[in-house]
Image (cartoon, grey):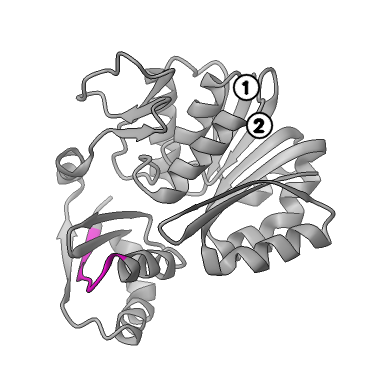
Amino acid sequence: MNYVELNISVPSAEIAEILTAELSELPFDSFVTERDRLKAYIPQDALVDCKEEADAILADYNITDCRYVQIEAQNWNALWESNFEPVDVDGRVLIRAPFHEPSPTAQFEVVIMPKMSFGTGHHATTKMMVEMILDADLKGKSGLDMGSGTGVLAIAACKCGAERLDAVDIDDFAYENCGENIVTNGVADRITPIMGDVRAIAGRKYDFILANINRNILLGDMDNYLKSLNDGGEIFFSGFLDSDVEAMTTACAARGLKLKYERHTNGWAALGFTK
């Protein structure tokens, strides 16, 4: 699978975060911010159907310095290795690649080779989700990681004591990559990668659900999530901006969910609710 990098000159970190949120509504699945440039990655085949929408988003923010760069599949790992630095979560968890040095002090590590899958811990939403996982009591519980990408959240949940998880993603490369990462982290017997969308969880039941996707998908699929969440269970959301919190909390309150966790970082938000 070949990818395309949309390389954008951004005037501020705030605009970079906003563009990340806007482009994530399209099939862009990975983002890297370097100084004054945002790099957004999308499968080459998917770009054909949404390039006009992407260009319109850039035009809305008066972005003129940008370019599309084709990346061959065999170069993807080298690209990630050059950009991927270890991520420290509150001094408690280290998210790192296999080529990084282990941490002597972290409670545990999550070792991720991201390849083409979203979820390295670098994005504020992933980090906030891990923070909520650390604060929750998941011991002995069953869970769902919806839109799992690399499987980083499912792995973190297992290392916090969860008994088993389903890791669901619509992307075939994410499915394969998650399978590799759970083996690396020694949790392959407790995490089941599943390729598919929300229909894949029909009839399944969970004690907790992790969903770091985007606002529109979260709102559109929320009723399906709640059908699979046991009474008294917890559901953790991220992938949306501070400006989306009201819409999320209103939708959750209308369904009888009670707010329990809330995080904010660099304009992004994460919320956790009890059913």
Magenta residues (range)? 4-13
Q: Is residue 183 above or below residue 6?
A: above
What is the crowding at mark 2: few (fewer than 14 residues within 10 Å), some, or many (at least 20)? many
Q: Is residue 80 above or below residue 182?
A: below
Which of 235 and 132 lies nearest the eye of the viewer?
132
Q: Is residue 268 above or below residue 54?
A: above
Asked which quadrant contains residue 120, the reply is top left
Which residue is pictured at 49% across the width and 17% down the height? 187
Q: Is residue 263 left or right of residue 50?
A: right
Amino acid type of the residue that numbered disc 1 sits on in the rendered structure: Ala
Asked which quadrant contains residue 158, the reply is top right
Amino acid type of the residue that numbered disc 2 sits on in the rendered structure: Gly
Which residue in the protein does label 2 denote? 143
Q: Is residue 124 above or below residue 135?
A: below
The question of residue 29 being in magenta is answered with no
CB under 8 Å between discs 1 and 2: yes
Dominant secondary-structure state across the stretch colored magenta: strand
Which residue in the protein does label 1 denote? 162
Chain-order first, disc 1 or disc 2: 2
